[in-house]
Image (cartoon, helix red, strand yellow):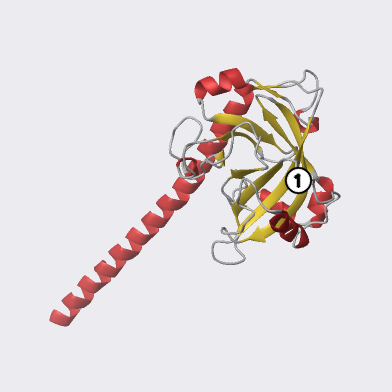
Amino acid sequence: MKKKTVKNVLYYVVLAVLVAVFCFSAYKIYSYYAEKRESTRLNESVAREYTIRKTGQAKEEEEYFQVDFDQLCQQNSDAVAWLYLKGTPINYPVLQHDDNVYYLDHQIDGSVNSNGSIFMDYRNAPDFSDRNTLIYGHHMRTGNMFGKLVNFKSNSYYQQNDHMYLMTPQGTYRLDLLCGAVVDPTDPIYSVDPTPEALSACMRKSTFQTKLDLPSEDARLVTLSTCSYEFEDARYIVIGVLTPVPDAQT
């Protein structure tokens, strides 16, 4: 009888543990997708409210658009730009805090969300006047944030998407893509003023064949960075060259 009682106790203990593990896993999965939905909802709402589209032009045909930065900055004064890649989820305001931690898990409205936000390095000048401006975003498996940035590991993808657009309060820029590379987070390219050698090294190991030459030393660069998984703490970066769009209005 005693052995049977012990077995019964063990059975219910194991059952309780399994149920707890199942419930916890279900909760984590639900939370993950709930946060994804909330992040998508908020970003779509922000895009509707603060971007100005051309009448009669299909959204998927637009190369760039106007952003009402006066109104956007009233919602969040950390807004410094808007990054856009046609035909992808990359259509986000770029924020800047006084550290590189806050926007890892905060959205533009200040709410906590593991999707975080797209944000500029705190060391950078917010007007993109530095030699190299660093912009970060999570590699979300749902495709949100910079989840689609890793598509540039394919040369064929680059051939169809060789530029992005960056709208700022000062003007609109075309971001012509120079290279994409898997790097360590301590790579010297993570600098507001990287050496020509650091830039050349990234170009040599680029995942796509660029149409551009090594830019001059007075060219302004933007480095987009997200997590990658080739090795521990791997990062995938895409570097572009800023070119003003003279006839665009912001």
Specify whether residue 186 is in view.
yes
The amino acid type, in three-letter code, at marker 1 is Glu
Q: Is 224 on the left-hand or right-hand side of 73?
A: right
Residue at figure coordinates x 44%, y 46% from the top left: 31
Compared with 246, 191 (above or below) is below
Quadrant location, the N terminus? bottom left
Compared with 7, 82 (above or below) is above
Residue at figure coordinates x 78%, y 17% from the top left: 55
Compared with 94, 55 (above or below) is above
Disc 1 target residue: 217
The secondary structure type at the circle numbered 1 is: loop
Within 10 angstroms of label 1, few (less than 14), some, or many (20 or more) residues? few
Write down the quadrant of residue 161 in the picture: top right
Residue at figure coordinates x 83%, y 56% from the top left: 209
Quadrant location, the C terminus? top right
Q: Position of residue 203 (x, y in %)?
A: 76, 57
Specify whether residue 144 is in view.
no
Write down the quadrant of residue 206 in the picture: bottom right
Q: Is 6 on the left-hand or right-hand side of 31?
A: left
Q: Position of residue 151 (x, y in %)?
A: 72, 53
Compared with 43, 49 (above or below) is above
Residue at figure coordinates x 72%, y 61% from the top left: 201
Q: Position of residue 221 (x, y in %)?
A: 71, 43
Q: Position of residue 240 (x, y in %)?
A: 74, 45
**Viewer-proximal residue, 245 or 71?**
245
